[in-house]
Amino acid sequence: MKMNENFFISKAIDPLPYESNWEAPSNIALIKYWGKKNLQIPKNPSLSFTLDKSVTRTSIRFEPSKSGKFNFKFFFNDSLKPDFDDKLHVFFDRIKKYVCWITNYELTIKSINTFPHSSGIASSASAMAALSLAIMDLESYLFNFEKNDFFFTKASFLARIGSGSASRSIKGPVTIWGDNRKISNSSDLYAIEFGKDLNSIFKSYQDIILLVDKESKNVSSTKGHDLMHSNPYAEKRFLQARRNCDSLIPIMKSGDLDAFIKIVELEALSLHAMMMTSNPYYILMKPNTLSIIEKLWDFRKEKNIPACFTMDAGANVHILYPSEYEKQMIPFIDQELSSFCKNKEYIVDQVGAGARKLD
Ligand code: PMV
C-alpha cells in the first residue's frame, strides 16, 4: 500500500528510558538524485545499491527530560562533537511533527563510521538512516508494534527528511526512492526495496571505492541541489533520469550487463555535467578521476569484463562488477588503478542486505 504523510504522524505518550543500537549502511546511486523541492522531495526517482561494509553504528540513550525540554548530546568516535549540532537540530525540528513523543526526551547519541571520514562515501546517508532506525525502535516500543513494513518505511521517511539519499539506506540490496510509474508502490516520501524480481547477479555485486581525494568537497551536496533551480539543463536532466530509471528497472530483472553499464556510466557523467553547467560552475572530478575511467574503459575492452564505474558528488570512483570477476579485478585495481588514489587507498565493499539492530 502507498502511504501519505498523515500515516507517519504519531501520538504523544509519557516517556520511558530506553536504549537502542543500530547499524545502517551507506549506498551508491546508479540513477542519481540531483535536484529537489521542499523537504527532500526529489525531482526524479533514484535507484541504488546498498553497501555492506561501509556502515554507521549509532546508539541512542533516551532519558525522560528533567527540564521538560527536548535536548541531545552527540558523540562521534567517543568525543563530544558540537560541530554536528546545527544539522541535528534542523533534523529534529523537522521530524518532531511525525514523532511528537520525542519532545519529552533527552538523547545521548553515539556514532562511529567503519569507513574513513571524508572518504567520499555518503556518511550522511548511513548516519541519518541509523539515527532514524533508533528513533523508530523507541516508537515501536512505546506504541507496542512489531518491526514490520511500517517500521522500516517510516524509518526511511524520517531518514529522507535528514538527507534525501538516506531514505535508500534502510533496506537492500537495491532500493528505489521516488515516484515511478512502472512501480506502483514507489513514493517520493520514502524508499522501497527493488523486490523479488532482482536478478541474482546483482545480489553479490562488488563495489571498489577508489579514494582519489580525501579532502572535504568545496561545494556541498546541499548547494549542488540548490544550483539545479537555475541550471538551464535541469528539466531535461530530470526527464533523462526518469527515462534512465524506466530503462534500468527491466535491466535489473534481466541482468543485461551491457545495457546496465551504459545507463550507470551515463548517469555518473550526467551528474557531473550538471555541476559543470551550474552557475557558478564547478568541477569535483580530479585529473586522476579521468585517468581511472580511461584505464577502466581500456581494460574492459581488452578483457571483455563487464566492470563499470559510477561516482558520487566527489572525485572518488566506484568500480562495480559481478563477484565472479574478482580474481581478474583485484590485481587490475591494485596494480593499475591504486596509484591514482591518495596513499594508494581504496575500499573493498559489496552490495549488502540493509540496516540491522545491534545487541
Ligand atoms: O542526499 P544528499 O542530499 O546528500 O544527495 C546525494 C546526491 C548524490 O549522492 C550525488 C546522488 C544520490 O542519489 O545519492
Image (cartoon, rainbow, N blue to C red):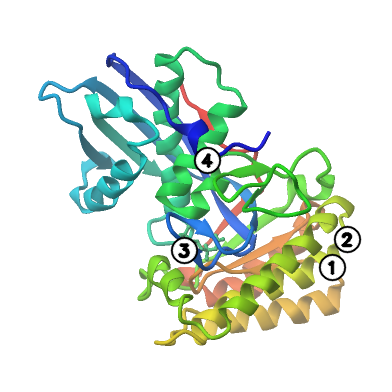
Secondary structure of the residue carrying tag 1 is helix
Residue 62 is left or right of residue 349, and the answer is left
| CA distance for labels 2 and 1 | 6 Å
Figure check: 277 above or below 205: below
Residue at (46%, 63%) from the top-left corner?
120
Nearer to us: label 2 or label 4: 4
Query: What residue sits right under mark 1 in the picture?
Result: 259
353, above or below 64, in the image: below
The crowd level at tag 2 (other Cα within 10 Å; few <14, some 14-19, many 20+) is some
Pointers 2 and 1 in contact (C-beta within 8 Å):
yes
Give residue 256's mark.
2
The amino acid marked with disc number 3 is: Gly
Mark 4 and mark 3 residues within 8 Å of each other at the beta carbon: no
Question: Residue lying furthest left in this view?
Answer: 67
Instruction: Provide the residue designation for mark 3.
Output: 120
Q: Tell me the amino acid under the disc marked 1.
A: Ala
Badge 3 element: loop
Left or right of 73, for residue 273:
right
Rendered position, 170 above or below 39: above
Q: Is residue 217 visible?
A: yes
Q: Secondary structure at mark 4?
A: helix
